[in-house]
Structure formats: structure tokens, C-alpha cells
Amino acid sequence: MRKKSLSLNAILNAIRSILNMLFPLITYPYITSVLSVNELGKYNFSLSIVNYFALIAGLGISSYAIREGARIREDRKKLAVFTNQMLEINLISMCFAYILLFLILSMSSSLHPYKKLILFLSIQLFFTTIGVEWLYSIFEDYQYITIRSIIFKIVSIAMLFIFVKKQGDIFQYAAVVMFATTGSNILDAIFARKYFKVAFCKLQGLKKHIRPIMVLFASNIAVMVYVYSDTTMLGLLANDYTVGIYAVSSKVYSMMKSVLSAVLIVSIPRLANLYGAKKKKEFKKIVQNIIDTITILLIPSVVGLILQSKNIIMFISNEQYIQATSSLVILSFALIVCMYGWIFSQCVLLPAQQENVILIATIISAIVNIVLNFVLIGVWKENAAAFTTLVAEGIMLAICGWYSRKICKVRVLNKNLVTVCIGTIVVIFVCKIVDYLNLVSIMNLLISIVLSGISYIVVLIMLKNEHVMAILNKIKSLRVKY
């Protein structure tokens, strides 16, 4: 297989992530003006319940399939057998998830008001399973993934404005959001035939995959607990209004995390391939590049989120949600901890088959998160949920970072960080100057983003940041060619 450019894949995946970010940025101001805070809270609570069962349906198959599939992708026969085994295990786990969901909905009276919405949202479990998106990641086919995402997102935005027009259109909103993903899943299932043909596998052949999948599944459960338990516990210990407030700040947090993690996700198949081939120097070089790139993007982004938190809340919603500003500030700090934790867990430990360490770290993080939520939500409400996320991500970073040192020693404190910090100071200075102009909220936000972004890049170029200079040199070489 022709080796694809990691830089190009990162750019394509970043475009896809930015598109995923723009989708709620375009739709959220409209949705928050059409649906009530309580309706938005009801939707997010129902989605949080469905996500638990989506986790059961998915097991740890995606992460495991990408890692192991990347090692054997040159051998199409082995990969075809492996892909069918993964699909068969996934179908079994999906059926189990549906059975469990129906049982819990029939027995739980507290979930009765959300029953219809939960069942409707659960349709995505089936389509996610048959979509086998992890197969395209194995082959690093991010061009296809990006193009089909653009098409379905554009269609979904048009459908939103057509079908969601008034309070009470909560099912219409759920249908439009699901279409953006389920449509892609159907397309994935159709085009997957170019990689393999569906065939029945003997159950004995599945056994060897069960243990590592279940370890990754356990890790995913723990991650889901401290990601979605915030919303679930706010719904149980507070009310739908508080869930609606937290939904806005957590949406911004999730969007930023999605865009920044694009650099990491595309690297996992390549890192798994390199580690399996025992190419340790190349492995370490890519991990170090990922850390430096994330640092360049992350630090100014977090500072910008903190400085512009109120304007961002106003941009994606309205004055009803201004209370979400404080929880967004807390989640901004969590973003720093989260991204570095992801590098060590997903880019170092996972390719090195150290899923047991990831499991231990996530279990400890989840337990601490739940305990703190029980203690603090009654007093601090949505701010407590944000704070417990920060603590959980901090624990994850500490444990994964410590064990990653045995596999791949990298440096965070280097010249790259110094140039980034100087550039970030300029970002703060520019944002403060714009504040003195007393512009309306949206204008303040847009002008601050543009001016601070340009200033930041200029400072990095002046300080000759090696990663920025490398990108400029690539651009220059392309111009010479054409």
C-alpha cells in the first residue's frame, strides 16, 4: 500500500473535525432560539443514556481493529478474515446492547418521560455497527471520510432549517442530527465491499480477540463514565435546566477537543504499524511531532476560550445560557490536560499494546469523577460537573504520562513551547485591545479570532518555530513545482 502523508491526513481529518464543529456552531444558535432550555436538556439527557448503550454495542472494537488491522493491512486475505471477525463480534454486542436497553426502559420509571426519545436515538447503534468506519481508518482513507462528511453535514443543515421550526420539534431535531451520522454509516457499509466481502466466521476464531477487546471496552466504559456521567448526574441530582446550561459549555469543549484530536487520530494506524515493525526511532519522532503540533494549537486556543468565554456562549446560544460561561472557563483548563493525556494513552500506550495501563487509569479517573459529582453537584451544579472533568482528565494524564516514559521519552518543555508561550502573550494583548473597543459580542469574538490568529502566526514565524517553518517550506516547494 502506498504510504499516505500524515500531514495531509491530519489536514483532512482537521477539516472534517472543523466541519463537525461548524455544524453545531451554525445550528446551535438556531436550536437554542427554537427549542426551550428544558427541551434541550431533555434531548441531551436522552442522548447521554443512549451513549452508554452505544458503548456496549461498540465494545472496544474500533480501537482494537484500527491497531491490529494496521499491522496486517498489506495482507488482504488476513485483513478480510480479521474484518469479518470484528464485524461479527460487533453485531453480537449490538444485539446484547439493544436487549439491555429494552429491559432497563421497561423497568425504570424515572426514564419513562424520556422513553420515546431514547428509543428513537438508539437507531444509531445499528447504523454505527454496519458502517465499519474503523476499516477506512486502517487504510488511512481520510479523503473519502472527509468528502462524505461534508456532503451529509451540508444536507443536514438544510434539513434542520426546513423541519425544526418551533418548540416541541425535539424529535425532528434528533432525526436531523442522526441523519448526519447514519447517512455516512450507510455509505460506509456500501463502499466497504472494495476492502472485503462479508462472510460468516467460526466462533472459535473469535476467541483470541475477546480479551484485548474487553480490556479496551472496560477502558471505554470508564472514559464514558467521566464524560457522560456529568450530564446524567446533573439530570438526576439537579434538573433539565441545569443540564441545558451545561450542554452549551460542554458542547464548546467537545468541539474544540474534536478539532485538536484530529492530529492524533490519523497517527494511530501509522504508529501501530511502526511499533509492530520495531521502528522505535520513527515511532518516537512522530510522537514528538504530535506533542509539538498539539502545543502550537492548544495553548493559544485555551487562552482564547477563557478570554472569549462569554462572547462564545452568546455566539452559539443566547442570554438564557450566559450562566454557562463559568463552566466553560473550567472546561478550558480541562482541555489542556485532556489533550496531553490523549497523546500518551492513544499515541503511545495503545500502539504499544499497553491497554491494561489505560484501563487502570480510566477506572481510577471514573471513580474519582463519580464521587466528586455526588459531593459537589448539589452545591456547584454545572460548575461541579466541569471541575470533576478537569480532575478526572488530570489523573488520566498523570498515570498515562508516567507509564509512557518507559516506551517513548519525549519532551514537552522545549524551544517549541517557549515560542508558543510568547505568541500566546501576544494573543492576550490583542484580545484585551479589542475589548477596549466596546464592540457587540459577535463582532468582538470574530475580530479577536482573526487578529489574534494572524498575530500568533506572525510571532511564530519571527521566532522561527521549526514546525511552522517546515510547513512554510512545504508550501514554497509546492509553488516551485507548479
Image: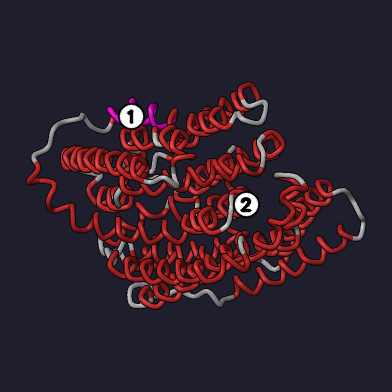
Residue 150 coordinates in the image, percent (x, y): 54, 32
Q: Residue furthest right?
A: 437
Could you say which is closer to the camera, residue 321 or residue 363? Answer: 321
Could you say which is closer to the camera, residue 331 or residue 337? Answer: 331
Residue 434 coordinates in the image, percent (x, y): 86, 57
Q: Tell me which corner region of the image, top left, top right, bottom left or bottom right, holds residue 310.
A: bottom right
Residue 435 coordinates in the image, percent (x, y): 87, 59
Residue beneath disc 2: 252
Q: Mainly helix, strand or loop, the magenta region?
A: helix
Could you say which is closer to the camera, residue 403 or residue 119? Answer: 119
Residue 222 coordinates in the image, percent (x, y): 37, 61
User: What range is drawn magenta here?
Assistant: 184-193
**Horizontal placement of 418 versus 263: left or right?**
right
Q: Residue furthest front?
A: 109
Residue 71 sits inside the magenta stretch: no
Amino acid at the residue labelled 2 = Val
Q: Considering only vertical position in the picture, is 416 above or below 134?
A: below
Q: Considering only vertical position in the picture, is 133 above or below 251?
A: above
Amino acid at the residue labelled 1 = Ala
Residue beneath disc 1: 189
Q: Is residue 478 visible?
A: no
Q: Tell me which corner region of the image, top left, top right, bottom left or bottom right, holds residue 257.
A: bottom right
- Which residue is depicted at the point 68% across and 71% down? 421
Separation of marks 2 and 1 at Cα, in angstroms: 31 Å
Could you say which is closer to the camera, residue 2 or residue 165? Answer: 165
Q: Considering only vertical position in the picture, is 71 above or below 456?
A: above
Residue 186 sits inside the magenta stretch: yes
Give residue 303's mark.
none
- Circle 2 packing at 10 Å, graded few (<14), some (14-19), many (20+), is many
Sequence-earlier tag: 2 or 1: 1
- Which residue is depicted at the point 16% across and 39% down? 81
Q: Is residue 303 visible?
A: yes
